[in-house]
Image: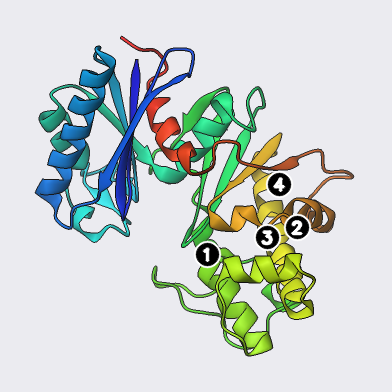
Amino acid sequence: MRIGVDLGGTKIEALALSDAGEELIRRRVDTPAEYAPCLEAVAALVIAVEADVGETGTVGVATPGAESRITGAMKNSNLQFLNGRLLRSDLCRVVDREVLIANDADCLVLSEATDGAAAGCDPVFGAILGTGVGGGIVVGGRLVTGPNGIAGEWGHNPLPYPEFDHSGPLPSCYCGKAGCVEKFLSGPGMSADHERVSGNRISAREVAEAADRGDKAAVATVERYSSRLARALAVVINILDPEVIVLGGGVSNVKMLYETVPQKWDPFVFSDATATRLVANRHGDSSGVRGAAWLWPLAP
């Protein structure tokens, strides 16, 4: 049995999978606001899941941020109290066994490449388009993390060719740079772009819903967004040449993207044709917790 835990900003969810990938049980609690209670909540969820199923399992945890290869401490987490903490070693202590951890974007792509929308495909790139923008890579069925622990982190590269559809100064990012992919392709980025052009501030979800109804301003926003996403993903295709790119996060629910983006990326891909497919995730909000469970390839 594999146990996956998704450590999120608002909830902690635990899921048990059989060796065949069948969901056995799922539990969730609100995320505590402090570090020590957060560790205790994870341990309590693991204990509860194992008690319900009646067996022990491996434990993998999807986390916001990443583990430093130098110090072992967490970095780049939007769950601020995790930064600087030795999360993995602390989890091993409270759960009383070895624990594997990975960034939530890595867990999404591992889930979708294992038994989701990209199952059987190789290589696979997964992109999270939500409050932030993240990514992950699976090659040969295995997650690629890299010596710096940042493989797939395309969200903090500059948006390619911003002059194609953006005028004025590039937006500043919390990472200290300007013009990052995340500032354009996150949900807040779509919302801000819609307000900049139309004067109407609505959420990315509302933009998508309005576009589905045929609202001209919303359709135009999604078209601009599609162009930016196509240019950003073309860079990924040029470097990795993935068989499939799978989208996750709230913006992945914008249906227009799966038709318009592949139509727009060809001019930026260094090939005479682009065979890469763009697909929506299969497991939705469960991809992170399922991917955490799949961090262990075999149950003990």
**Quadrant placement of the N terminus:** top left
**Residue 168 placement, left or right of 261:** left
Instruction: Locate residue 31, reporting x and y percent.
Output: 24, 51
Residue occupying image coordinates x 34% and y 51%: 65
Type of residue at label 1?
Glu
Q: Looking at the image, is 229 positioned above or below residue 170?
A: above
Spatial CA distance of label 4 from label 3 is 14 Å
Instruction: Locate residue 227, reporting x and y percent.
Output: 74, 65
Q: Looking at the image, is 159 positioned above or below residue 11?
A: below
Task: Identify the mark nearer the N-term, 1 or 2.
Answer: 1
Spatial CA distance of label 1 from label 2 is 20 Å
Spatial CA distance of label 2 from label 4 is 23 Å
Q: Which residue is mark 1?
A: 182
Type of residue at label 2?
Met
Task: Identify the mark nearer the N-term, 4 or 3.
Answer: 3
- The part of the image, by quadrant, that contains residue 123 is top right
Q: Which residue is mark 4?
A: 238
Q: Residues within 10 Å of mark 3 (few under 14, many from 20)?
A: many
Spatial CA distance of label 1 from label 3 is 10 Å
Q: Residues within 10 Å of mark 2 (few under 14, many from 20)?
A: some
Q: Looking at the image, is 5 positioned above or below residue 213?
A: above
Q: Which residue is mark 2?
A: 256
